[in-house]
Image: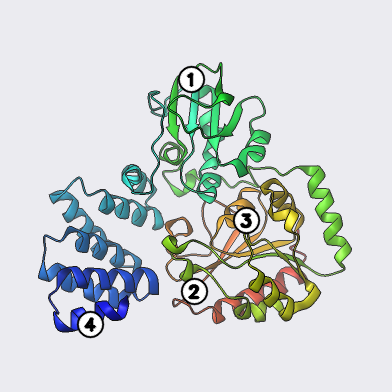
Amino acid sequence: MIALLEAVVDRSPRHAAACNMLGLVLARERGRFEEGAHYLRCAVEANPALYEARSNLGWVLTELGQLDEGLQCLDALLAEFPGHHEARLMRATANLKNGRFAAGWGDYDARHHSATAIASPYAYPVWDGSRQAQASLLVTAEQGVGDQIMFASCLAQARGRVGRILVECHPHLVPLLRRVFPSDRVGVRGAEPSPPAWTAGSNIDLQIPIGSLPRFFRNTPADFPQHGGYLFADPVRVRYWRERLDALGPGVKVGLSWRGGTVNSRRSLRSIDPAELSRLLEHPGYFVNLQYGSSGPDLQAFGRLVGSRFVHWPEALDNYDETAALVVALDLVVSVCTAVIHLAGALGRPVWVLTPASPEWRYMQAGPGMPWYPSARLFRQRHAFEWESVLAELVGELARFESQGDRI
């Protein structure tokens, strides 16, 4: 696709649509943001009325660290076209990624206009965050498992403002959230306009999407609690997995996940092939598979690289509650940006994140941590697809982690 677009632009340098698409693909799919910005500027100069190019340019500039210029671009576009929801969402995520939380949440409702958004089928009034001690609040599910885990950090605070809470969530999360709210109701989302059967008799008064909770509870860095975990694994299963890990032999036990995202969420930028992890795998100890949907070729590659020191327990991956128990039993989780980061962080377990040069907003623009999870540590790429220096830093820290007795 890139070659085709480059051919079009070579023939017609002022072909605004082609310049826009080429700039977006180079930035989003290849991590070549400087080149992407060049072509997007060409598109805007050729056709200032091409709002998509202006929106994409604003996003690319913020990814390049040129936050003020990028926001100015998005602000100007939205002043002309307030209904451009994609630009508003880009402005939201740019602000959130740079720690401007109050401004970011102000625009974050634009996500409901995304082509992939699924609207709530229920007709209840939307909660405004106020204290309503007698009200029953239905928190509706949205986005993926990782996002639901992250936003679930706000549920206890929401629960403190209402009389009762009902939580819709992904099926994976039902047992975990039921442990947090044993006196309330937790269940999976229904497909019909009427609420699912597990809410029967609840007399629901209000509803809110789970991704809208942070605007009430996470508006400054100080609003993020320094928690030791807000989800809890089954203690019986934790003991079981600790016994299995101990039986492997001495050495640190590291959970490992190496592929993240989908074709539509920049999988290539977020993933690492097993061979690229060889430096990490040379560290003595055991590496336990946490990669959901592991492929046969990948598992065979790890077998060749580390033999029996790579452990694959399918039963721990087929059930998310089992995965949670295994995560708690491990010494450390090392993963690319995927849902297991959120799971480990929400369980309060040490988790090290192999972070791409241009991560999603949840992982922030810079710095070694993410405010959602005090136990998370980020090892950031300097350039797209360049993992060698990231892994060198991580391996050095792993030796220190083990020698200093940081295992908990």
Q: Looking at the image, is mark 4 or mark 2 earlier in the sequence?
A: 4
- Percent across and percent down for residue 2 are 31, 77
Q: Is residue 22 left or right of residue 100?
A: left
Residue at image coords 50%, 21%: 136
Which residue, given by chain and number where applicable, does mark 3 sit on?
Answer: 375
User: Which mark lies nearer to you, 2 or 1?
Assistant: 1
The CA span between labels 3 and 4 is: 48 Å
Q: Which residue is mark 4?
A: 7
76 vs 177, nearest the viewer: 177
Instruction: Tell which circle, 3 or 4, labels the residue nearer the N-terminal end.
Output: 4
* Residue at figure coordinates x 69%, y 55% from the top left: 317
Residue 282: tell me if it is visible: no
Q: Residues within 10 Å of mark 4 (few under 14, many from 20)?
A: few
The residue labelled by disc 1 is: 204
Which x, y percent locates residue 404? 75, 68
Nearer to us: label 4 or label 2: 4
- Spatial separation of the CA atoms under disc 3 and disc 2: 20 Å
Q: Amino acid at mark 4?
A: Ala
Q: Residue at x 73, y 58 (%)?
A: 314
Cα separation between marks 1 and 4: 58 Å
Please give left or right for residue 362 compared with residue 32 in the image.
right
Foreground residue among 80 and 168:
168
Other residues around mark 3 within 10 Å, as few (<14) / some (14–19) / many (≥20): many
Disc 1 versus disc 4: nearer the observer: 4
Q: Which residue is mark 2?
A: 381
Q: Secondary structure at mark 4?
A: helix
